[in-house]
């Protein structure tokens, strides 16, 4: 996908309230293409958070990892589409029927005010599948009863998402090449667990730099704490954009 470094950077607004989120968006809007609203901010501020970002000209990645019976998820994501978000996540462990229900519901949308990335069709929100969280390693996977090799599990879930018509998946740097091989270059990869060289991994088990992620074919990278908890978020965002450009 042809994207500028700015369009590739997604900042996770993992904060407690709208005031804090607004402060970050005001600071970062010139440097960041997409802002991610996840469980923390959405639980506190709801659709107001989405509206705030859109009013300032930002695009929204709604990361609520929907996982329920097909009808419930389809109805919920219909509302997500109406809110004009740029991309959102559903959980691939919900199974093919759930994934297809969402894809079919979203396909009926052609949002009047929705601005897709230039050259990228169709003009509807991107549906992104979550497979295995980047905070889980092989041991953590075993604890929840999945004995398959972590990589194999991620690839299998990506292929399931592709078959169901999902636009792409969240994937760690280590899995991107194989996912693109198996699902095609157009299948979007969104990569969290990104850290500037030498920074703390926090609770992430599979981390990489922005340069590494883009180097292996990531379309978008997600950065949370390294930017939002920095003394100077703009400086870190600029550093990461330089790494993407490099
Ligand atoms: O602070 P940090 O950069 O680790 O934040 C990463 C963000 O990406 C968090 O908002 C987290 O919910 C999200 N994420 C992830 N791993 C996934 C899917 C989403 O870390 N597999």
Image: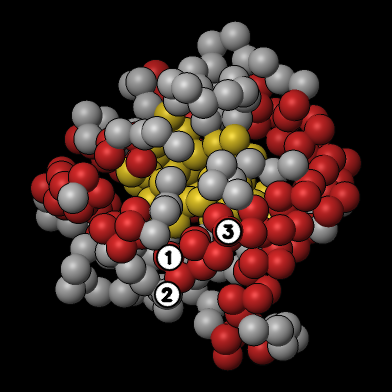
* Residue linked to disc 2: 206
What is the crowding at mark 2: few (fewer than 14 residues within 10 Å), some, or many (at least 20)?
some
State the residue in front, 140 or 39: 140
Q: How many badges with numbers are in the image?
A: 3
Residue shown at 39%/59% (left/top)? 216
What is the crowding at mark 3: few (fewer than 14 residues within 10 Å), some, or many (at least 20)?
few
State the residue in front, 213 or 52: 213
Mark 1 residue element:
helix
Mark 3 and mark 2: Cα distance apart in space? 20 Å
* Marks 3 and 2 close (CB-CB < 8 Å): no
Q: Is residue 53 visible?
A: no
* Residue linked to disc 1: 173
Mark 3 residue element:
helix
- State whether residue 136 is above or below residue 219: below
Disc 2 residue: CB within 8 Å of ligand 1: no
Mark 2 residue element:
loop
Quarter of the figure that contains the N terminus = top left
Whole-percent x, y for residue 117 in the image: 45, 25
State the residue in front, 24 or 125: 125
* Residue linked to disc 3: 181
Residue shown at 57%/86% (left/top)? 138
**Earlier along the polypeptide chain: callout 3 or callout 1?**
1
Residue shown at 30%/34% (left/top)? 4
Tag nearer the camera, 2 or 1:
1
Residue 89 appears left or right of 157: left
* Marks 3 and 1 close (CB-CB < 8 Å): no
């Amino acid at each position: 996908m042809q994207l500028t470094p700015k369009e590739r950077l997604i900042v996770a607004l993992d904060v407690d309230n709208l005031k804090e989120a607004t402060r970050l968006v005001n600071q970062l809007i010139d440097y960041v293409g997409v802002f991610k609203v996840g469980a923390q901010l959405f639980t506190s501020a709801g659709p107001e958070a989405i509206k705030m970002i859109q009013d300032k000209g930002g695009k929204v990645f709604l990361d609520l990892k929907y996982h329920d019976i097909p009808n419930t998820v389809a109805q919920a994501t219909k509302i997500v589409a109406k809110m004009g978000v740029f991309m959102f996540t559903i959980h691939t462990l919900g199974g093919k029927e759930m994934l297809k229900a969402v894809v079919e519901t979203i396909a009926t949308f052609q949002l009047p005010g929705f601005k897709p990335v230039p050259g990228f069709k169709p003009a509807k929100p991107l549906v992104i599948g979550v497979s295995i969280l980047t905070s889980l390693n092989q041991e953590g996977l075993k604890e929840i009863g999945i004995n398959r090799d972590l990589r194999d599990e991620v690839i299998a879930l990506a292929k399931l998402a592709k078959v169901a018509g999902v636009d792409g998946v969240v994937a760690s740097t280590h899995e991107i090449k194989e996912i693109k091989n198996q699902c095609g270059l157009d299948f979007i990869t969104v990569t969290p667990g990104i850290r500037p060289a030498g920074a703390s991994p926090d609770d992430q088990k599979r981390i990489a730099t922005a340069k590494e992620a883009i180097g292996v074919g990531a379309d978008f990278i997600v950065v949370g704490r390294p930017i939002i908890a920095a003394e100077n978020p703009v400086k870190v965002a600029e550093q990461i954009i330089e790494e993407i450009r490099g």
